[in-house]
Amino acid sequence: MQKKIVPLFVLVLLCNAALSQEYWQQEVHYNIDVALNEKQHTLKGNLSLQYINHSPDTLTCIWFHLWPNAYKDDNTALARQLEGDKEGKKKLKNKKSEGYIDGLAFTVNGKTVTTGQDSANDADVIKLILPAPLAPGQTASIATPFNVKLPFYFSRSGYDGDQYMICQWYPKPAVYDKKGWHAFPYLDQGEFYSEFGTFKVNITVPAAYVVGATGSLQTKEELDQYKALGAQNYQAKAGVAKYKAAQPDALKTLQYYGENIHDFAWFADKDAIIQYDTLQLPSGKVIDAFTYYQPNGNKEWSNSLSFVEDAVRRYSGWIGEYPWPVVQAVEGPKNLSSGGMEYPMITLITSPDADAENLDAVITHEVGHNWFYGILGSNERDYPWMDEGINSFYQFRYEAEKYKSNTIFGKSMPKELKALPADELLSRIYNALNSLPAKEPVNTSSTGFANKNDYGIVVYVKAATWLYLVEMALGREKFDKAMQEYFATWKFKHPYPEDLKAALEKSTGMGLNEIFELLNKEGSF
């Protein structure tokens, strides 16, 4: 065989190309101090973060989300989206006050920086021009004060009376990955994509408030009181013990800490009733479980903690063990602005009229997002099915095994179907779900749907049906093992559809080109 001499510069190019294909992700470490003014419905905060560039690229700017500016006026991407949808217009009618973020003064490594906007002039997207290029492996120290005016609650974040839902509230770097920057504006129909790291957050509120938040509460006296009251309420299965501050008009500061998370939300309420229990996972690991609910809310919340615990146990067994030290669920206001919205370690749920089965289903769905969104941090804006659809698949399994029912069909499930074994019932359910009108392919971005109804049918139901076809093709045992290996490989990372496919093929030794092509199919399967 004749030898060929490859020029050195070609070898260098090949080497660099190979290195650029290796997986990497950026890393962000947050320190935030924030104080709530309940009279003005405002936040005053200071943010400092360490942004670590693990990419192979030298960065000259870092894009940031300024989510509160989505509520600023009728010209934002959020307002335009809501105005174009029938249900969205109803939400806009509920908008009793605007929201925004201001008082920003960004510095990078101690130097004041200039900022720019995207081509659409989105008020909630901003670009920091770095004072010096950030090379691979380098860290930028970024800081800014900020003030937030909270809107009346109509889309994820805001206030309703004395209840606060503090979500998408702080300046946050956009994701930079192998496909570039993902600096998109806030939308109601369309969720998020964020970098993993750590959060140290100090929250100052009037002492009368009960607070639930992402992360572990480090303030021992407050945590001990929550646990004692919560355990008493859980044993009684009723809200008999209420939180009482020694000096309700004073201020208190609570410290929270979380690792391997990509977002931080918190909820504050003067009237919240707490339930608490410890939960032992399959490995023997013990975590804390809390629920916070309204004294005059849905009475089924007296069973909420058992729903949270059952969801965590089952998802841990099916997919992979819950990794964080605490899991929580919060009952939102009767205002129906969202049926539920998930954040790492905590979820908000507004289902005031749900019966026990339906409340269990929505709590399970939102708790399940700790896996599909929280741990497996996929790009929800471009591939919403990777969290909503996969999570719905496991929710449907949960409902079939526990109740012989399905949320989509509600009380209309015939008795003869409920008498079937769970696996046969699921087969019938998915056969029926496949007949629902679902024109768009599963692989449609969240902005590619004309309305919430089409989005729901495709992203939740059609995507779950597709994953059921994958399970049928592989068999339950092989499928579960493959999903567990996908979870183990990609937890605390940013998987794309091709990564899910590669993980399933590696685990099973089967080629799945044909079934993954179905993700691009219009109509039913």
Image (cartoon, helix red, strand yellow):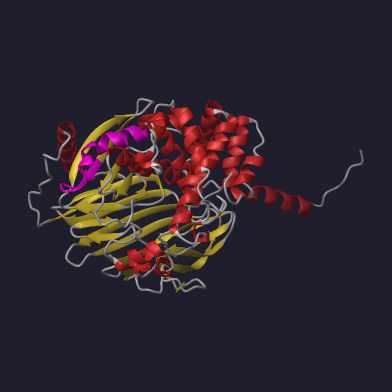
Quarter occupied by residue 45: bottom left
Q: What stretch is highlighted in magenta?
A: 291-313
| Residue 493 visible to the viewer | no
Please, what is the dominant secondary structure of the magenta stretch? helix
Q: Residue 390: percent from the left, percent from the top?
A: 48, 42
Query: What residue lies at 31% left-to-right and 34% top-to-bottom?
Result: 309
Q: Residue 9: percent from the left, percent from the top?
A: 77, 54
**Is 60 situated left or right of 232 in this image?**
right
Q: Residue 512: percent from the left, percent from the top?
A: 64, 38
The quarter of the image holding the C terminus is top right
Residue 141, compared with residue 512, is above or below; it is below
Quarter occupied by residue 79: bottom left
Closer to us: 217 or 367 = 367
**Is 158 situated left or right of 423 in this image?**
left
Q: Residue 68: percent from the left, percent from the top?
A: 35, 65
Q: Does residue 472 belong to the magenta stretch?
A: no
Closer to us: 225 or 523 = 523
Residue 220, compared with residue 169, is above or below; it is above
Closer to us: 275 or 438 = 438
Q: Does residue 306 belong to the magenta stretch?
A: yes
Query: What residue lies at 55% left-to-right and 32% top-to-bottom?
Result: 482
Q: Residue pushed farthest right? A: 2
In this figure, what is the number of numbered marks? 0
Residue 468, compared with residue 215, is above or below; it is above
| Residue 318 visible to the viewer | yes
Query: What residue lies at 83% left-to-right and 49% top-to-bottom?
Result: 6
Query: What residue lies at 50% left-to-right and 33% top-to-bottom?
Result: 427
The quarter of the image holding the N terminus is top right
